[in-house]
Amino acid sequence: MTNKLVFFIFLFISFFSLNAQDNVIKTDSLKEVVVTSARIDLPFRENSRTIHIITSQDIKNSAAVTVADLLQQVAGVDIRRRGTGGSQADLFIRGGGFDQTLLLIDGIKMDDAQTGHHTMNAALPIEVIERIEIIKGPAARVFGQNAFTGAINIVTKSSLNHSVSANLETGSFGQLNGNITVGSELENSSHILHVGKLTSEGYHVNSDYDNTNIFLKSVFNKKAQPIEMIATFFERKFGAENFYTTNPSFNEYEETQNSLIAFTTTFKSEKLKIQPRVYWKRNQDIFLLRRFEPNFFRNVHISDKIGAEANASYTSELGTTGFGVDVSKIDLRSNNLGNRNRFMTTVFLEHRFQFLDNRIDITPGVAMTYFSDFKFNAFPGIDIGVDVTNNLKIYGNAGFTYRIPTYTDLFYSDPRTNGNPDLEPEEAFAQEIGIKYNSQRFRASLSLFNRDATNLIDYVRPNAVEEIFTATNIAEVNTKGFEVDAAYNFKLNNFNQTLAFGYAYLDDNILDQNEELSRYSLRTLKHHYTTRLSTQLFKNVRQNIVYKYAERTTGQTYNVWDASVVVQLQQMELSITASNIFDADYIESGFTPMPPSNVLFGLRYKFR
């Protein structure tokens, strides 16, 4: 622990010593970024919530290949991968479970009624992402169902002008990746198309994958009432060795398909903004316990979610009011879970008051949801912020959150697991206080949080002899901790440099648990350090070094170093990305070891 504290103090001393230099980086400040994941659109500086922004420049400097790799660099966000290439990864924010974090694409909810294991199947290729907005804690309550611990909104690029870029990568474990991204600006429409393929022979037995990404974004009728369309199709085919079991006679295999089509438009006047949307999301999952014996054990699940929503905000002398409604219908066909359907309606309302020359803001709000198979729920909350200076803000949040059981929780069955159709929704009351500073050169934030959750779903057995675990509302969990994020931008040899740092401490405790009779195993990140140094010493060459330290509640610790070098040669870009440079031996989820040290060589060409 002493070494960790020394490291922690050293980095902060480094930040503040750099802050004394005279050179100031000239980059776009986060102050100007309008956060769209909130119901009321606000510039980043004005938000009284814990929101972490990953900008397009951060993505470029991340040494990441997928969104899962990218999110691992944010303290307090726990991405537990079962392999590489984005095949499968579970998403956690501030502990909790993989069903308790909501993913959105341009504000469209991508929750899956079957299981939270599919959340990251909807993650976009990084080539089409403008930024990622990470909302932590009780402030995410405005999204309703599944934003139990937080929410992540992936914002897509609005335009790529007239451009074509092709990317080819190859490296360790037979990795071969290729994609092409096209941008087109026409007189009355604009279009972005991305088609990509990621393949690998695998880094250990039965860990190969063959993944396909297709993304299309179009804006029609630009001269009158613009209509935006987003369409995605992501297919994953991968060996799933030891994903869920350690039986040496099994040879697991899984295929998933995730697709989305949505249409959105915006009506806007001086005081009123209304954004209606219709969407259809589909997920298909096929799992084989023995890859080459499909009749031995085979699960097939197909889910469809069709929805319509309207989000609005109105500005008056009393402040800004955000309100809206989301109506959706879910259908599931499954050989294990049965044929299920659910109708959902969510109504939200919040109002932002400002006092003392807008130095103080108070935003109370409530989300109300009706489920056809669960009772009506209303979950209120409040955000409070005080501007100490133009760059320094103190804020606090408190609110209730909830999650209804997935169909896996309710109805899944195998020789060692039983679902429970009598489960109740999980509920929590969360509180948070924080302080954040943001300037063009330096930004930092500190937040302290607490969450008291009840009715959490655990899989338990009545005694140590019984082998069948049944889903039960039994666990009460208290989660508390703090997070620190900081980044310093400076100049060296007239080139921009960035040093970023994050640390999260988490105390996640299941109350009154008999660990011998429970399957709920907390593997949360008790200590989580992340550091990224992005440098440029020559005109056409930039380097990135990423360090991650993790200590889980199980006692497992690991240090992982990644790095990349990018060389720009006019229209051509050459890159080398090295992952797990010092060959750390570690597991993020289940029983699957993560890859040893590996390298990926890339070539990107932009056509004029």
Image (spheres, rainbow, N blue to C red):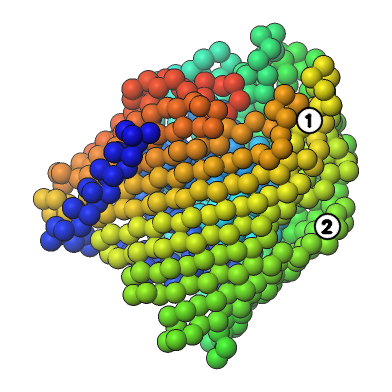
Q: CA distance from mark 2 to mark 1?
A: 26 Å
- Residue corresponding to mark 1: 460
- Image quarter of the N terminus: top left
Among numbered discs 2 and 1, the one appearing first in the sequence: 2
- Left or right, residue 34 beside residue 308: left
**Residue furthest toward the front?**
512
Query: From this viewpoint, is residue 232 visible?
Result: no
- The extreme bottom residue here reads 317
Above or below, 111 relative to 363: above
- Tell me, for residue 606, which label it has, or none: none
x, y percent for residue 372 = 87, 56
Question: What SS does tag 1 mark?
Answer: strand
Please name whichever residue, 287 or 223, is drawn nearer the observer in this view of the structure.
287
Residue farthest along the top direction in this orientation: 249
Note whether 36 is above or below 146 in the view shown.
below
In the foreground, 579 or 402: 402
Q: Which residue is at 49% across, 26% downward?
A: 556
Residue 253 at x, y percent in the picture: 67, 21
In the figure, residue 317 lies in which quadrant? Answer: bottom right
Residue 320, compared with residue 594, is above or below; it is below
> Mark 2 or mark 1, which is nearer to you?
1
> To which residue does mark 2 refer?
371
For mark 2, give the secondary structure: strand
The amino acid sitting under disc 2 is Phe
Relative side of 214 to 571, left or right: right
How far from the left and from the top, in percent, is residue 475?
73, 41
Amino acid type at mark 1? Val
- Would residue 239 appear left or right of 445 to someone viewing this image? right
